[in-house]
Image (cartoon, rainbow, N blue to C red):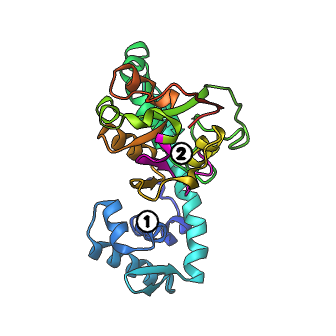
C-alpha cells in the first residue's frame, strides 16, 4: 500500500515565488520598467505578476505615482518579510555553489578609482600568481550602506572601521602632487610654479558623495598647504573644472585638458610610463591614507 502524505498547507498557501521575485525587484527600484530590465523580462510581465500577487493577497502592494511606484503599508510589510527570506536563500545558494567550486572566491570592496587605477594594472599578475582565487569586486563611494546580502571579505577604504568583525591594516601612506601630460606641460610651462598652477586650468576633485572615500583634498587645500590662496586666481584664468569622479579627472588630464592632483598610489604607474609628469618640484603634500 502506498502511503500518501498529508497536504502541506504552508506550501499550498504560499504565493508564487516568481511573482514574489518580481515584487522584490519592483519594490527595490520603485519602477516597473527598471524592475523588468533587472530581471530581463518585459514591463508587461512585471505588471501581470504584480496584479496576480495583489489578487492573491487581496491587497494593493503599490501606489502608482506617474511612472514610479511606492509601497503601500501592506506592501512595506510584505517587502520587509520577503526581502530577508530572499537574502537568506541567496546566501545559502552561494555557500553551496562555493563548496562545489575548486576556487576560493574573495569579495573585495573599494572605490571605483582604486579599482581602475590601482587594482586594474595588477590583476593579471595576481591571477597568474593565485590561480585558485577568483575575485568578486564591488565598487562604491558609500562604504557604510551596502545592498542587503553583500558582505565583502575585504574593504579597501580610508574609514578606520566599516562594520563589526573586521580588522584594519594600513596599506599606503600616500603623497599627493600635481600631474599633467608632457604635452600639456610643454604648452603651459607656467604650471611649473605654484602661482602658475593657481592660475592654470585645474581639474578639481569635488567632495560631493565622497565623504566616506577619503579625507578630502582638493586644489584649495593643496595650494593652501603651500601658502597660496586659490581665491586670488586671476580674473583671466582658464576654466576650473569640478567633478566627484576621480577616474574622469585622470582621463581628462591624460587628454591634455589640464592639471589634476595625483594620489601617488593611483597615478605612479602612469608617471612611471611617462604618460603623466609632475610639472614642478616645489614641494608635495604628504597625506596618510587611501584615495
Q: What residue is shown at x 56% (from left), y 50% (from top)?
A: 149
| Towards the viewer: 69 or 23 | 69
Provide the secondary structure element on which disc 2 rests. Answer: helix
Residue 272: quarter of image: top left
Query: Was residue 201 drawn as part of the magenta stretch in this picture?
Result: yes
Q: Which residue is mark 2?
A: 91
Q: Is residue 69 above or below residue 41?
A: below
Q: Is residue 89 above or below residue 125?
A: below
Q: What residue is shown at x 62% (from left), y 48% (from top)?
A: 212
Query: Was residue 55 drawn as part of the magenta stretch in this picture?
Result: no
Indicate the quadrant containing the C terminus: top left, top right, bottom left or bottom right. Answer: top right
- Circle 1 packing at 10 Å, graded few (<14), some (14-19), many (20+), is many
Q: What residue is shown at x 48% (from left), y 66% (from top)?
A: 28
Q: Is residue 236 visible?
A: yes
Q: Which residue is mark 1?
A: 25
Task: Tell which tag, 1 or 2, sits nearer the viewer.
Answer: 1
Q: Is residue 138 visible?
A: no
Marked residue nearer the N-terminal end (1 or 2)? 1
Q: Position of residue 194 (x, y in %)?
A: 53, 37
The stretch in magenta equals 196-213
Amino acid at each position: 500500500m502506498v502511503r500518501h502524505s498529508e497536504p502541506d498547507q504552508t506550501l499550498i498557501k504560499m504565493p508564487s515565488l516568481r511573482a514574489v521575485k518580481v515584487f522584490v525587484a519592483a519594490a527595490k527600484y520603485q519602477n516597473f520598467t527598471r524592475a523588468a530590465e533587472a530581471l530581463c523580462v518585459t514591463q508587461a510581465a512585471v505588471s501581470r505578476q504584480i496584479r496576480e500577487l495583489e489578487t492573491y493577497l487581496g491587497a494593493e502592494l503599490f501606489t502608482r505615482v506617474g511612472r514610479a511606484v511606492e509601497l503601500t503599508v501592506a506592501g512595506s510589510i510584505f517587502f520587509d518579510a520577503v526581502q530577508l527570506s530572499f537574502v537568506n536563500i541567496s546566501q545559502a545558494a552561494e555557500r553551496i555553489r562555493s563548496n562545489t567550486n575548486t576556487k576560493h572566491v574573495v569579495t573585495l570592496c573599494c572605490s571605483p578609482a582604486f579599482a581602475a587605477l590601482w587594482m586594474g594594472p595588477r590583476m593579471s599578475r595576481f591571477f597568474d600568481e593565485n590561480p585558485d582565487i577568483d575575485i568578486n569586486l564591488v565598487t562604491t563611494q558609500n562604504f557604510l550602506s551596502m545592498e542587503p546580502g553583500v558582505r565583502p571579505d575585504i574593504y579597501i577604504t580610508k574609514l578606520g572601521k566599516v562594520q563589526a568583525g573586521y580588522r584594519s591594516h594600513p596599506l599606503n601612506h600616500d603623497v599627493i602632487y600635481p600631474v599633467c601630460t608632457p604635452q600639456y606641460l610643454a604648452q603651459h610651462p607656467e604650471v611649473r610654479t605654484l602661482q602658475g598652477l593657481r592660475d592654470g586650468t585645474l581639474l578639481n576633485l569635488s567632495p560631493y558623495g565622497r565623504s566616506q572615500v577619503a579625507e578630502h583634498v582638493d586644489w584649495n587645500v593643496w595650494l593652501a598647504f603651500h601658502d597660496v590662496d586659490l581665491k586670488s586666481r586671476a580674473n583671466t584664468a582658464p576654466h576650473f573644472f569640478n567633478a566627484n569622479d576621480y577616474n574622469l579627472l585622470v582621463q581628462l588630464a591624460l587628454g591634455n585638458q589640464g592639471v589634476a592632483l595625483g594620489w601617488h598610489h593611483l597615478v605612479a604607474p602612469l608617471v612611471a610610463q611617462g604618460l603623466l609628469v609632475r610639472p614642478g618640484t616645489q614641494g608635495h603634500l604628504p597625506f596618510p591614507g587611501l584615495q
